[in-house]
Amino acid sequence: MLGVLGGSGLYEIDGIEILEEKKLITPYGEPSDSYIVARYKGKNVVFLPRHGRGHKFPPHLINYRANIWGFRKLGVRKILSISAVGGINPLLRPGDFVISNQFVDFTKVRPVTFYEGVYTIHDEEDRTDDLVNEYLKNDRVVHIDVTQPFCPVMRGTLKNVLEDMKVRFHSTGTYGATEGPRLETAAEIKALSILGADIVGMTLVPEIVLARELSMHFASLNVVTNMAAGISENRLTSDEVIQMMREKNEEIKKVVLKFIESIPESFDCSCEDVLKGAAI
């Protein structure tokens, strides 16, 4: 089943049938909001607003582990993340879509793993017969491979959807993840540019890492809302981010519908093998 992480109201799309809202409690605390379980053309999909409805949680205080673990409890194996980002690469323009294929992480204070050795938090209700459950119950220390962090099948599906829609997009992009909630300095953006970052945002990490630790498939679709500090000649504001996401809202919803429709049932990738040989 597919999970969609994004903004509030993303599930309010013509053609999507809302089945139920599920409020979950996890061993890591409460997720950002209730999960919206829906169906579209015979396929079930679960939506979660990462900041909570009404944008209650700043990026550094989102309960990422609860959000991702809640998806697992609901049977989600694939996650599509939709985010607003700043543009670093000069080839980008506000309004462009970017499909991430790499990230660099400059977050600081967030829990970034489920596997904490003797400090591991256990979910006594989890009966799943997999390596996740085995490693957690045995307090294993785990080092996952993130050489290619994103699912190639999901990225390929996104690329085909965006091509069919004839919108302006970039099929690769390195996401620079920062702590927030403040925006970056011009010097920080320059440093990220030197390191190869094309876009900058505050939520991809640890979402992608936690999903990968649970052997999930994960893809990141980003909307460039403005150019980043030192690249834009103007003072950066939240207003321009909100305005651009409003302008792109209907387009984003069409992408989600086409993605749900197009995603294959079986995946030819190694995402589900990431835990093999990863535990000490």
Image: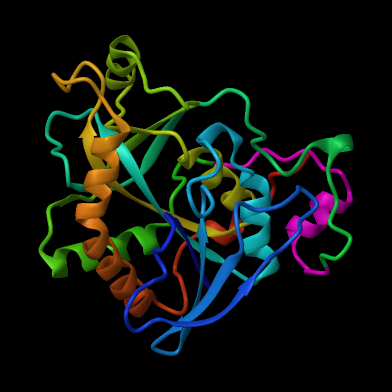
Horizontal arrangement in the rendering, residue 132 relative to residue 242 (left or right): right
Q: Which residues are magenta?
A: 127-145
Quadrant assignment, res 42: bottom left
Q: Is residue 17 above or below residue 222?
A: below
Q: Is residue 128 above or below residue 152?
A: below
Image coordinates for residue 55, horizontal then vertical, percent: 48, 46
Image coordinates for residue 119, horizontal then vertical, percent: 86, 36
Q: Does the rendering let one see residue 194?
A: yes
Q: Is residue 10 above or below residue 225?
A: below
Question: Relative to the observer, which residue lies in front, 46 or 267?
Answer: 46
Image coordinates for residue 124, horizontal then vertical, percent: 89, 60
Quadrant assignment, res 154: bottom left
Horizontal arrangement in the rendering, residue 207 relative to residue 113 (left or right): left
**Magenta region, mostly helix, strand or loop?**
loop
Query: Which corner quadrant holds the N terminus?
Result: bottom right
| Residue 131 inside the magenta-drawn segment | yes
| Residue 22 inside the magenta-drawn segment | no
Residue found at x 68% / y 56%: 69
Horizontal arrangement in the rendering, residue 269 relative to residue 194 (left or right): right
Horizontal arrangement in the rendering, residue 28 relative to residue 197 (left or right): right
Query: Which corner quadrant holds the C terminus?
Result: top right
Q: Is residue 215 above or below residue 142?
A: below
